[in-house]
């Protein structure tokens, strides 16, 4: 029975309640759920359009829209409304897309649009998790054909224990952030960042994730069945199975099968490169089209699909039966590798990495704290000190297209490579630089993201950034024909396109730092993933050994072209002494020394200097401006003014034309004997030792000259001033005739 006019069902995930409302909102969408996880609330809808003429692919679009009201914020900028999605929103949309895309029928080519509106955010309950499970429910109750449901969880590791959907506090302590999505039977999407976690731990984490996913998918299926009972779920539309005319299919096979299989064998035997192989295969296809054109002039589109299918079959059979690949390599063989550093003469660091016909050049720039990226999203993180940007120009594949701003692919690949490198960066306390790496793809034939990891790591080491360990990445593939499974190391473009899996693994010698898996089949088992990870580990170690032939580790000194950053900490109460009224003092320091200064609210001060001398001078000025006089300490001071009652002594000199810190030496504190006139002991401009003896009730510093010297030394000094000898064994007057010699 529907108690509130809509169906609400809930499940506990990681100790927190997850619920969906069906039939409550967005009634005109094919499927819509109002999902709540803790206090996180998202609306997820699924809709479809009628078939468009001329489509020969599945046009799936996933949008993830963040609303700033979800965290009680008003958007920045002039317009004060949300603009294009940020990086976090794009990555969340990609996670949803990659989780659901393999589960639509191959012959289904209608437009499908999945939209997530993030309306309320509880930081301990991930809106991305809510979005993916919400999409699973929305698609399951819609009329859209979908081979789900799916579930998703995040696995962390805190103090050696695996944790499902860690809270923000747990995530900060975790050395693993593993997002896994899948059906009841298999895993179909993996995304991870890790702190050199071993393959064994990763396999264990995948197993724990899949067990939780099974529980979630069983719940979604029960919710779908109940929604159907109440008329809140739609019947799935029929997907027509488009089959070619048997006579045409037989004719294509008769004319083209032998030619296509021979062409694939030719590419293998000659070990043709990408361009030559693509051209040879294309020429073979054209030959087949022309041979059938006269008999089937109206069926060229169908013939093209049949020939493409034939090409895929030939390549896959080559791998599964002969265990040899299109370019002649064995399944676990890596293409030729080239490693270079210091390629760009004026950057702070650069690395050029080439693997086969995939080539990436990475350039590194070190900047000041003020160069951090400011984030305007829904997370608690406000700034980002490490940025990895990935560019994929059309010339890298020999195409002629205009250059556009970064798309979802560029953002996703850049984030993956950045996650792999971020795990080995030194902490900000030890290395207070903002770091930006830009990876330019110069040539592409498979796994440019993992080549970006390698080139980026080379740039870090070339710049002298003290990373924990070098990182390398490799892309794995899969050909699965019935029970025959072949895992491929270092896949090229054709194997990515025609294969069943793209599995990217990056890490150090000690363990994994990033992992991503996309598949085109319903899912794969943890056992296959474990085998792929072990094969990837061997490839990673091979690449790391190639690094050592050129650069064994980070250079011992930071690049001479990089700015020098000096870090110091002051009392937050002293910040105003550095800033000055209207920023007058800090501007004068920067103008005088040529540095940039960043001051944090907690008292951390970062001096970014083009030269070591300028940085040291700025540090000395800041230390002088914020120095404290400690009671009980002795200072060498300068007499700045003499009065009848004592002398004012400057113990910390002024800088930038500003007064320093001084105190009063009362006449009674000038010497151990009675002083009649201050000028008898000191005059303006004299340098004297004084001791800080206290602060008076008006906050003024009290100094003592006599306490700055030991009593005996003080008596000698006093006697010297009065022309008397008070050394041990000597009297104050003439020697007595009764004294012993």
Image (cartoon, rainbow, N blue to C red):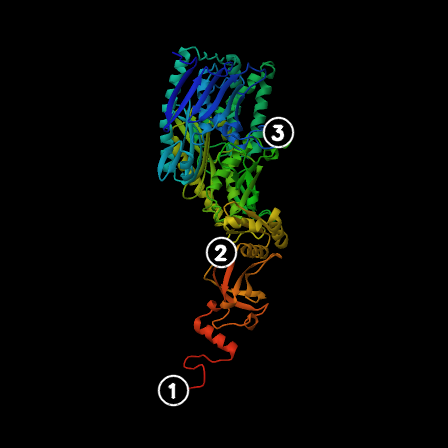
Q: Is residue 358 visible?
A: no
Name the foreground residue: 43 vs 648.
Answer: 648
Quadrant showing the N terminus: top left
Tell me the CA gap for discs 1 and 3. 100 Å
Name the foreground residue: 688 vs 100.
Answer: 688
Q: Is label 1 in contact with label 3 (beta carbons under 8 Å)?
A: no
Between tags 1 and 3, which lies in front? Answer: 1
For disc 3, the marked residue is 79
Residue 318: x and y in percent read 46, 28
- Mark nearer the N terminus (1 vs 2): 2
For disc 1, the marked residue is 739
For disc 2, the marked residue is 697
Few, some or many residues within 10 Å of mark 3 (<14, 14–19, 20+): few
Few, some or many residues within 10 Å of mark 1 (<14, 14–19, 20+): few
Element assignment for label 1: loop
Image check: 54 left or right of 164?
Answer: right
Tell me the CA gap for discs 2 and 3. 55 Å
Name the foreground residue: 541 vs 622.
Answer: 622
Element assignment for label 3: loop
Q: Is residue 553 visible?
A: yes
- Mark nearer the N terminus (1 vs 3): 3
Residue occupying the point 63% across, 54% down? 592
């Amino acid at each position: 029975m529907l108690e509130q006019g809509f169906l609400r069902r809930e499940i506990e995930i990681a100790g927190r309640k997850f619920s969906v409302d069906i039939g409550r909102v967005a009634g005109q969408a094919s499927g819509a759920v109002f999902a709540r996880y803790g206090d996180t609330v998202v609306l997820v809808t699924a809709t479809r359009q009628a078939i468009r003429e001329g489509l020969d692919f599945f046009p799936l679009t996933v949008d993830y829209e963040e609303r700033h009201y979800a965290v009680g914020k008003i958007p920045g900028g002039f317009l004060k409304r949300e603009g294009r999605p940020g990086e976090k929103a794009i990555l969340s949309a990609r996670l949803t897309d990659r989780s659901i895309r393999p589960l639509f029928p191959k012959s289904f080519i209608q437009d499908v649009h999945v939209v997530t509106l993030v309306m309320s955010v509880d930081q301990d309950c991930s809106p991305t998790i809510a979005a993916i499970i919400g999409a699973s429910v929305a698609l399951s109750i819609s009329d859209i054909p979908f081979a789900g449901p799916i579930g998703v969880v995040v696995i962390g590791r805190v103090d050696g224990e695996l944790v499902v959907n860690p809270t923000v506090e747990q995530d900060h302590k975790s050395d693993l952030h593993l997002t896994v999505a899948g059906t009841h039977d298999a895993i179909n999407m993996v995304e991870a960042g890790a702190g050199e976690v071993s393959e064994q731990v990763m396999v264990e984490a995948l197993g724990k994730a899949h067990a939780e996913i099974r529980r979630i998918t069983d719940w979604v299926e029960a919710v779908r069945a109940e929604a159907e009972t109440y008329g809140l779920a739609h019947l799935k539309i029929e997907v027509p199975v488009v089959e070619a005319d048997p006579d045409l299919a037989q004719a294509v096979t008769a004319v083209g099968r032998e030619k296509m299989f021979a062409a694939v064998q030719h590419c293998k035997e000659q070990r043709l490169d990408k361009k030559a192989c693509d051209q040879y295969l294309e020429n073979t296809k054209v030959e087949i089209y022309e041979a059938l054109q006269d008999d089937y002039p109206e069926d060229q589109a169908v013939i093209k699909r049949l020939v493409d299918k034939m090409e895929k079959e030939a390549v896959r059979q080559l791998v599964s039966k002969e265990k040899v690949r299109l370019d002649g390599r064995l399944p676990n063989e890596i293409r030729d590798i080239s490693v270079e550093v210091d390629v760009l003469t004026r950057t702070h660091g650069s690395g050029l990495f080439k693997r086969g016909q995939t080539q990436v050049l990475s350039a590194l720039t070190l900047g000041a704290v003020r160069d951090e990226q400011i984030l305007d999203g829904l997370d608690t993180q406000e700034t980002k000190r490490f940025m990895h940007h990935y560019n994929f120009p059309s010339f890298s594949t020999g195409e002629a297209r205009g250059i556009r701003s970064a798309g979802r692919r560029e953002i996703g690949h850049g984030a993956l490579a950045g996650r792999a490198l971020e795990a080995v960066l030194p902490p900000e306390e030890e290395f207070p630089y903002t770091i930006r790496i830009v990876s330019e793809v110069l040539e592409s034939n498979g796994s440019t993201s993992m080549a970006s990891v390698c080139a980026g790591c080379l740039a870090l080491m070339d710049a002298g950034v003290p990373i924990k360990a070098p990182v390398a990445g490799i892309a794995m593939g899969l050909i699965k024909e019935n029970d025959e499974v072949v895992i491929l190391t270092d896949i090229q473009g054709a194997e990515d396109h025609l294969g069943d899996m793209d599995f990217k693994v990056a890490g150090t010698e000690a363990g994994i730092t990033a992992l991503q898996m996309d598949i085109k089949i319903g899912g794969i088992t943890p056992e296959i993933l474990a085998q792929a990870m072990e094969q990837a580990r061997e490839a990673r170690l091979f690449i790391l050994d190639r690094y050592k032939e050129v650069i064994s580790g980070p250079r011992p000194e930071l690049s001479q072209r990089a700015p020098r950053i000096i870090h110091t900490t002051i009392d937050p109460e002293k910040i105003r002494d550095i800033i000055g009224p209207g920023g007058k003092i800090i501007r004068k320091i920067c103008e005088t020394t040529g540095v940039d200064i960043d001051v944090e609210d907690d008292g951390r001060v970062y001096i970014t200097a083009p030269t070591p001398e300028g940085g040291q001078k700025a540090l000395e000025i800041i230390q002088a401006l914020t120095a404290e006089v400690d009671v009980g300490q002795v200072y060498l001071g300068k007499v700045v003014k003499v009065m009848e009652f004592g002398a004012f002594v400057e113990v910390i000199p002024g800088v930038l034309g500003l007064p320093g810190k001084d105190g009063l030496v009362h006449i009674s504190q000038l010497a151990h004997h009675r002083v009649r006139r201050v000028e008898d002991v000191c005059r303006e401009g004299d340098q004297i030792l004084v001791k800080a003896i206290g602060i008076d009730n008006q906050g003024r510093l009290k100094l003592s000259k006599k306490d700055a010297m030991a009593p005996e030394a003080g008596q000698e000094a006093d006697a010297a001033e009065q022309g008397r000898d008070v050394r041990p064994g000597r009297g104050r007057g003439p020697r007595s005739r009764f004294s012993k010699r």
